[in-house]
Image: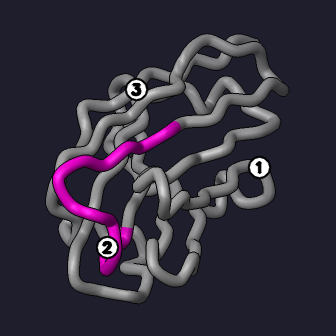
Amino acid sequence: VQLVESGGGLVQAGGSLRLSCSASGDPLNNYVIGWFRQALGKEREGVSEIVFDYGTTHYADSVKGRFTISSDNAKNTVYLQMNNLKPEDTAVYYCTETYGTNVVVEMREHKFDYWGQGTQVKVSS
């Protein structure tokens, strides 16, 4: 499966963005899709993940209550709705996938296989 992220941009603190992760090649059934981010000079960190078939979700503590991950089976796409954005959310956001499981993988990076090219999110103060 190939993953393509979109929806990044520049937004003021308190604003919102919706990122999309569109998959081609295979339907996302039996996949877990994750969102990670990497800020300049920092390690990549898990943001959220969703079990595509069941809608089970998992979030990093830093984004709970502000970000919502969702999926659209018909469009073979996963979304990350980001509200009340903060300057510390500034990063390149990547979507990634792992196949063959119907439970969350606790955003363990080594569990994920293929990655998109990333989309830049910048939050100004």
Mark 2, other Cα within 10 Å: few <14 / some 14–19 / many ≥20: many
Taking the image as shown, residue 12 lies to the left or right of residue 5, namely right
Nearest the viewer among 41 and 62 is: 62
Element on which disc 2 rests: strand
Element on which disc 3 rests: strand
Q: Mark 2 or 1 closer to N-term?
A: 2
Q: Marks 2 and 3, how far apart in space? A: 21 Å
What kind of colouring is applied to the model shown?
A: one colour
> What residue would you read off at disc 3?
119
Query: Quick one: which residue is furthest to the front in this view?
Result: 74
**Which of the image's four quarters has the N terminus?**
bottom left
Q: What amino acid is found at the position of numbered circle 2 in the picture?
A: Tyr
Q: Which residue is drawn at 54% across and 36% down?
A: 19
Mark 3, other Cα within 10 Å: few <14 / some 14–19 / many ≥20: many
Q: Marks 2 and 1, how far apart in space? A: 24 Å
Mark 1, other Cα within 10 Å: few <14 / some 14–19 / many ≥20: some
How far from the left and from the top, in percent, is residue 23? 31, 49
Q: Mark 2 or 3 closer to N-term?
A: 2
Q: Residue at x 38, y 34 (%)?
A: 5
**Which of the image's four quarters has the C terminus?**
top right
> What residue would you read off at disc 1?
66
Count of numbered tags: 3
Q: Give the range drawn in magenta.
A: 20-32
How far from the left and from the top, in percent, is residue 52? 45, 72
Nearest the viewer among 50 and 76 is: 76
> What residue would you read off at disc 2?
31
Q: In the rendered image, which quarter is residue 11 located in?
A: top right
